[in-house]
């Protein structure tokens, strides 16, 4: 059966085996501790629906690659919003902030003819400044973030219009910028990226595992660690395989293969922010302030500074979202970042499992939730419905995906807590 | 007193995910008696109470009320049976005032309009009977009350009604000397009026002062349920900390009592 | 676009490949004008159906991201011809370039994508529309013998490039009059999202702050109607001329009632038919013969083969033309309240 | 000094005098218990700003009357949202729900030629059904309300487009419906309404005061009750006076005076919902569920039913908002209820003082917050700025109004709790 | 012991809106001594503690720390001075686990990375020393802990650090018999190590068991601060309930001790 071991200050504990670990995992799932499982389930259901309805187009390599490029703006804004939502705040202005930052970049590139390595940092800096202002207004003046960012939502809309001189579009021609959300890595680089990614993941997992074992702390069974690494490797390599297939529509004219450049960009930010939230003091404090602001204050955490910082991160991420969407569209107009972008981004974070009340959420949730939203958008356009019906269906499909999630949790809750 | 229990639990099991908190727990509550439920921190006392009142669903076991087997899905069902509970985590609405909290779910009405005047009068009387003297106004929000004041409001809320069984989970933990005495007296009075009372407490003096029976939980198992007169102070403490005392209690095998620093920081 | 229930979209699910390739059409939105969802969709669907060409017609809902997503989807599903109404030149250009690398023939429909290099261009001239509006207002004011009339602008959405083009058009007519002092320039405000409710509020405020407004240049019939409601409240309807665009039922009724001065009718069926004809020819890999004119792309200076149509100014006198064209039906237009006016306007 | 009296179960209490009551009020205000005071202050600041910038137009009787008509939709949606927000939920679909209900009415009136007394109830019923569906999805399936109503936001947009056959406008000609948000009461009726309103208020106040005094409970000093009644009377009568001045744009052509019909409609709903929230069991339970759901559940309150009911109320109020906006525009288009309506409505509730986290809010907050929003909109359009600048200014002014609020609270918090 | 107090309060006033909760309160905390702060429910003990730790701002009065007058704006300042507090309303982050809560604000790091292993070890040791046996895992979220377990985590959190003054507001209220004994022992040990300890409790046995001095609050006024050895059990109870006992305590005038059902339900 189970064997015991001595750990953490000489306390007797059970040493988990692979079997007991898996048993416990299922008990936990049944107990309602589901993490991203329901959102992933929802995603699978969606893929199934669209895959059946439009198998040859939805499931094509081309469409798979398109998904990444299409999701970039929402995923980036959603990643930033996770921080704000973790504190139980909201940022309604993130969409237009991304538009403003995109416009700043476009203007510097086009009107002022500056190179991308000036324009992109300038756009990011704009994002940071925006976040700083919002954060200070919320944290120091104590105006509810809904109101501050509603004002900013209106204000930035005006700024964008003013920057674009009342409604012009600005097109960009810089090849580097355009490649960000349109280009692909070469096939060789795609594989190198996949291998480095998987190796990094494996190293991090093994390093942590060894650390705990050597300290005599209870660690996961080695089998589980290996299985997890193998799972990630399988996912990464099969995705890379599909992405390196030829997917040009007209193979005679051109060739199109390789991982979209936006994939490594998303992965890098995913890794950085996951690290920040899970492994640094700052991240810990973000969760603490979101979970119980008063407790955090009493523990000596500089609550105001944390509050400001999440707005800075959010607007910064929005600026990257803006850069990418401008890259994809090769232009910026007064509606860039408007429309449903904001609601979709918040929706992405929430569908992934982030709580609007603070304290609960992970960066990966934004990516998975963003995937749900984009798969719906992408799939719906493939169905070729007329506008009214399309809106209705989009709503219904979104609801269906969320119900899978809710029902999974509910079933779990019924048997567990 | 009466031979048939008012409320009887048998074979209650309860798990939270992989953690089993209650193992085959039985408990009998007799009318006109105070049953003290004792046990170490984390023994499962509060969990048992929440299973009775329908906050948690039970995994296995039966609940019998006045001889009928019942299923309690939620606190409404429990209230309908006449079971009132003062929870350890008080669960007051911070955005409501004292009177509003005390009458929550049982508001007095004139037609469809709330009868605030009557409620205020009744609340005032009840609080006075519990020796609360420092409340500045009955219309104070409970969020601004001191720990003991909140505790008193929660107690007053539960005993205002005509119920059959009253369960109090550490009701005197935050109370002052005078208030504790009043509450213990109240507990005795409720039992004397024929109610079944369950009192959870860590204070052995209080337990022996008012209770007729003592039930001891040890690591989620019912170690013993005995008459208070049949045991000594130190025997009860032994039951609490070791699960057994002489021929009382659980068989001498060790259940899993350890800090188990389980796998990873899976959140 | 044509959901299967409209019967217009044979869809990709038919599997059987017709001899002609598939055509993809992306319409811009449903808000700037009712035409996209009502007229264009209908006419294009009918035209493609008649020719037996498979077509996928979708609307981007004014969202550029969605516009690109739809384009990606169409390219992925293997269309041979792509017809777009761009939301702005930048996105349009990105889509056209993608289509070109995929070897797809492209048509700019209604709006020229600057620097986009589409193969063909079919359109009404939006600046021309604006000019007609300006001229219409001038005519009405002249008819009312207004002296130094104050003219208020109720422009379209500030985020819609077309609104800018319309404004360029009517400004080119009215600005000289302002400059010469013949007319007085009144308030000039944009209506976000072409939102009629906001349009009403904005005009109400314009009137509150400037009580002697004598003419309203409203960018479309919806906004025109919003202004007319405000005027009605102040019993000024009919006294202050209001312009419009799109020849909607609402707008035409307002014209018949004498509350609206004019609207601009774009024979959308003609435009749609022209585009469909081009697309069908391209899908069948024939060389189309209808595109006889050319337009010079002001950005790339390239010549684009074009079919150009002219918008028509509609006043009470020629409302009947619109009915005759089948753009609106008599039943829709001549409801009980307007029966008399209809007869007077010669609609039978 | 103070005299004591015996009350509530024979307890000695201080009998407040007018002086002590006022002193306590100020102490409470200094202690941070501000109610609507900051929002009212914000409103005054706004009126001052616009009154100075455009004194002859902004402060005219015409503009004053316009404010009521312009605010109707937002105020109604915000009143409904207060219920939803009281539970810590959100309804993103309220805007489009109002559009759908308005469209239902317009179609029944115009296309089907039905009379208003069929069309209006049908629109309201539509609102109720919508709320029921949303509420059941949130309460019974447990999907977060943000996601449910985001789906509904998209879905209703589609429904509206479909109802309007892809984008047509439908005009209404029914005079009764048009009068709702355009017409005015006659001067005589205006005064009758004002007098009845004030008398009702006075009766309610005095009745309650007498009830407490007769039960020997601590009651407000009589002087305070009288002063409050006098204040309300002053406000009501002076507003009625202004509204019964001649305000026609062109006095030669037409005459325009009297209280807008929409005012009694707003007042009636304000009174009803205030009564429901403050004086009925249902209202008490709404606050309880919003304040502490677990406590409410333990107190035997049917939490799910309460949750469903607030969505029903919200969508019902949205339907009235929709009816009124259609009345005002005399037509409905696919954007009715779209655009910024929703954000403005939530903003109105929040600016008034409603918490997004539940448990805190009153119906009057929606009206005052709605007034802030509409005064900004109204004032900004009078300034005749171009769009970009107008958006920026609107944002800034909104922020300024919110800052007044926040600073007032903050000052209070610094000296008090 | 040492003659100069480590922490000294003088003339502290504190009002919440129209309600004055503390009137001219003084308190001295000496190094190496346990000062018990007693008082009836609602006397103002917790409010006083929160004034010391900077959660509430004081309206009047001075705080002197090691002879220097200090102003404490927030708990950070207090922590910087070396004042650690266990609050009655525990204030744990429910969304964090035991280890994360215990090290909140003082995380151990390797470079910029959290050193989870070390923290887990230290947390395990501390909990074991406090007789906690039923915790299933150190990575359990505190939201799933029993009342007593939460209490223990809060105590462990405050005593893990090297501080000068430790204030415990009813730390044993929810604890079992064994755990209470451990905490009292810990309190004594802290004082013996030269720290100034303030213990708030309603349990006179506990108070007399560990404290060197007793300070009694009565309706927001400091009735008396005396050596524990100089008073009897019943004298202290009199001070608590009446504000005076013989020649000790407040002058015999009645402060406003009543339930005051104030004006309207103004919210
Ligand atoms: N939701 C939950 N998930 C997981 N474990 C839980 C949960 N609730 C309680 N537990 C565990 O169950 C055990 C019993 O908890 P319970 O609250 O019933 O203890 P108790 O006897 O009331 O203790 P105390 O005297 O401290 O109040 C504890 O070990 C606790 O950690
Ligand atoms: N924020 C507040 N607003 C108004 N009154 C308050 C507030 N906080 C506390 N009070 C009042 O101050 C008094 C003292 O409260 P405090 O919490 O300090 O009491 P305590 O001595 O700790 O009591 P206990 O033993 O019950 O914990 C109480 O009467 C309480 O109602
Ligand atoms: Mg317990
Ligand atoms: Mg206290």
Image (spheres, coloured by chain):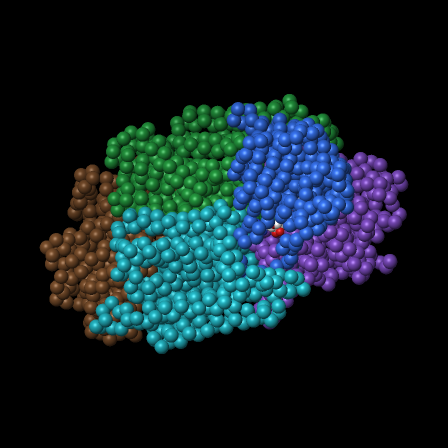
Chain colours: A green, B purple, C brown, D cyan, E blue
Residue in view at x 66 percent, y 53 percent: E253
- Using the rendered image of the protein, determine whether residue B100 is visible from the camera's viewpoint: no
All told, the count of numbered labels is 0
Which quadrant of the view contains residue D288? bottom right
Q: Residue at x 32, y 47 (%)?
A: D392
Residue D193: percent from left, percent from top: 41, 74
Q: Is residue A11 left or right of residue A139?
A: right
**Residue at 43% over, 48% down:** D407
Q: Nearer the viewer, residue D83 or B92?
A: B92
Q: Choose between D68 and C5: the one closer to the eye.
A: D68
Q: x, y percentage for residue E192?
A: 70, 29
In the shown orientation, is residue D101 left or right of residue E223? Answer: left
Q: Quadrant of the N terminus of chain D?
A: bottom right
Residue B188 horizontal side relative to residue A393, left or right: right
Residue situated in front as seen by the camera: C33 or A343: A343
Q: At 80% from the left edge and 54% from the top edge, which residue is drawn?
A: B34
Residue nearest the observer in this picture, B29 or A299: A299
Find residue A191 and report its image quarter.
Answer: top left
Q: Is residue A11 visible to the viewer in this orientation of the structure?
A: yes
Farthest top residue in view: A214
Residue A229: image location, x then y, percent: 56, 29
Seen as rendered, the residue at the extreme left is C180
Q: Quadrant of residue A123?
A: top left
Residue B119 picture location, percent across and down: 63, 64
Seen as rendered, the residue at the extreme bottom is D188
Tell me: D57 left or right of E95.
Answer: left
């Amino acid at each position: 059966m189970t064997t015991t071991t001595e750990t953490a200050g000489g306390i007797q504990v059970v040493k988990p085996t692979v079997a007991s670990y898996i048993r416990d995992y299922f008990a936990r799932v049944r107990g309602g501790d589901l993490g991203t499982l329901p959102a992933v389930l929802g995603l699978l259901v969606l893929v199934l629906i669209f895959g059946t309805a439009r198998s040859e187009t939805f499931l094509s390599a081309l469409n798979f690659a398109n998904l990444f490029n299409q999701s970039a703006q929402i995923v980036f804004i959603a990643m930033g919003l996770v921080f704000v939502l973790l504190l139980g705040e909201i940022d309604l202005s993130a969409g237009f902030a991304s538009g403003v930052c995109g416009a700043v970049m476009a203007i510097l590139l086009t009107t002022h003819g500056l190179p991308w390595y000036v324009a992109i940092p300038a756009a990011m800096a704009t994002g940071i400044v925006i976040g700083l202002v919002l954060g200070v207004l919320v944290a120091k003046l104590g105006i509810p973030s809904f109101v501050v960012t509603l004002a900013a939502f209106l204000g930035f809309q005006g700024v964008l219009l003013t920057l674009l001189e009342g409604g012009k579009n600005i097109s960009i021609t810089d090849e580097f910028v355009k490649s960000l959300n349109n280009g692909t890595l070469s096939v060789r680089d795609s594989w190198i990226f996949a291998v480095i990614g998987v190796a990094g993941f494996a190293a991090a997992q093994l390093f942590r595992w060894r650390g705990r074992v050597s300290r005599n702390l209870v660690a996961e069974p080695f089998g589980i660690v290996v299985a997890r690494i193998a799972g990630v490797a399988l996912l990464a390599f099969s995705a890379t395989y599909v992405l390196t297939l030829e997917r040009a529509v007209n193979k005679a004219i051109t060739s199109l293969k390789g991982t979209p450049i936006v994939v490594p960009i998303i992965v890098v930010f995913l890794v950085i922010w996951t690290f920040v939230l899970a492994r640094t003091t700052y991240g810990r404090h973000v969760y603490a302030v979101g979970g119980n602001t008063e407790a955090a204050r009493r523990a000596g955490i500089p609550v105001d500074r944390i509050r400001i910082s999440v707005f800075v991160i959010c607007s910064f991420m929005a600026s990257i979202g803006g850069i990418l969407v401008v890259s994809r569209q090769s232009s910026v107009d007064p509606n860039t970042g408007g429309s449903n972008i904001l609601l979709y981004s918040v929706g992405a974070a929430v569908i992934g499992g982030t709580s609007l009340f603070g304290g609960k959420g992970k960066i990966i949730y934004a990516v998975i939730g963003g995937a749900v939203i984009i798969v719906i958008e992408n799939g719906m356009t493939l169905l070729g419905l007329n506008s009214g019906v399309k809106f209705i269906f989009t709503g219904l499909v979104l609801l269906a995906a969320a119900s899978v999630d809710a029902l999974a949790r509910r079933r779990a809750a019924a048997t567990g807590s | 007193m009466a031979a048939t229990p008012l409320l009887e639990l048998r074979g209650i099991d309860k798990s939270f995910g992989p953690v089993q908190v209650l193992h085959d727990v039985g408990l009998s509550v007799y009318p006109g008696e105070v049953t003290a439920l004792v046990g170490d921190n984390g023994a499962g006392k509060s969990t048992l109470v929440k299973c009775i009142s329908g906050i948690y669903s039970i995994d296995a076991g039966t609940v019998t009320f006045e001889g009928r087997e019942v299923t309690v899905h939620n606190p409404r069902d429990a209230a309908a049976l006449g079971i009132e509970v003062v929870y350890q985590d008080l669960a007051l609405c911070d955005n409501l005032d004292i009177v509003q909290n005390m009458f929550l779910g049982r508001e007095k009405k004139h037609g469809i309009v709330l009868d605030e005047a009557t409620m205020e009068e009744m609340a005032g009387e009840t609080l006075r009977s519990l020796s609360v003297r420092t409340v500045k106004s009955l219309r104070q929000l409970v969020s601004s009350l001191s720990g003991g004041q909140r505790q008193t409001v929660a107690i007053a809320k539960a005993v205002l009604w005509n119920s059959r069984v009253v369960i109090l989970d550490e009701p005197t933990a935050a109370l002052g000397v005078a208030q504790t005495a009043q509450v213990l007296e109240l507990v005795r009075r409720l039992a004397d009026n024929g109610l079944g009372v369950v009192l959870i407490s860590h204070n052995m003096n209080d337990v022996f002062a008012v209770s007729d029976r003592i039930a001891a939980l040890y690591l989620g198992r019912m170690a013993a349920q005995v008459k208070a007169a049949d045991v000594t102070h130190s025997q009860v403490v032994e039951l609490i900390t070791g699960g057994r005392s002489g021929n009382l209690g659980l068989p001498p095998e060790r259940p899993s009592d350890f800090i188990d620093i389980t796998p990873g920081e899976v959140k | 676009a044509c959901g299967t229930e409209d019967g217009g979209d044979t869809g990709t699910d038919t599997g059987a490949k017709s001899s002609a390739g598939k055509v993809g059409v992306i319409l811009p939105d449903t808000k700037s004008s009712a035409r996209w969802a009502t007229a264009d969709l209908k006419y294009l669907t009918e035209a493609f159906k008649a020719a037996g060409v498979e077509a996928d017609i979708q609307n981007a809902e004014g969202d550029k991201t969605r516009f690109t997503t739809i384009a990606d989807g169409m390219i992925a599903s293997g269309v041979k011809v792509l017809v777009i109404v761009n939301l702005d030149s930048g996105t349009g250009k990105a889509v056209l370039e993608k289509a070109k690398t995929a070897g797809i023939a492209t048509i700019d429909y209604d709006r020229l994508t600057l620097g986009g290099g589409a193969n063909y261009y079919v359109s009404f001239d939006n600046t021309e529309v604006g000019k007609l509006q300006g001229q219409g207002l001038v005519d009405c004011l002249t008819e009312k013998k207004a002296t130094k009339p104050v003219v208020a602008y109720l422009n379209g959405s500030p985020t819609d490039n077309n609104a800018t083009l319309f404004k360029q058009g009517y400004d080119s007519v009215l600005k000289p009059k302002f400059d010469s002092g013949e007319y007085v320039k009144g308030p000039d405000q944009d209506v976000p999202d072409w939102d009629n409710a906001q349009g009403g509020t904005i005009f109400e405020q314009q009137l509150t702050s400037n009580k002697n407004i004598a003419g309203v240049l409203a960018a479309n019939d919806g906004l025109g109607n919003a202004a007319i409601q405000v005027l009605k409240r102040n019993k000024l309807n009919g006294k202050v001329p209001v312009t419009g665009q799109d020849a909607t039922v609402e707008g035409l009724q307002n014209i018949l009632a004498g509350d609206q001065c004019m609207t601009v009718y774009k024979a959308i069926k003609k435009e749609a038919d022209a585009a469909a004809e081009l697309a069908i020819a391209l899908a069948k890999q024939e060389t189309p013969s209808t595109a006889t004119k050319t337009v010079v792309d002001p950005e790339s200076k390239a010549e684009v083969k074009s079919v150009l149509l002219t918008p028509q100014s509609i006043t009470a006198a020629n409302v009947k033309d619109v009915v005759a064209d089948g753009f609106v039906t008599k039943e829709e237009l001549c409801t009980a309240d307007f029966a008399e006016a209809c007869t007077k306007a010669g609609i039978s």
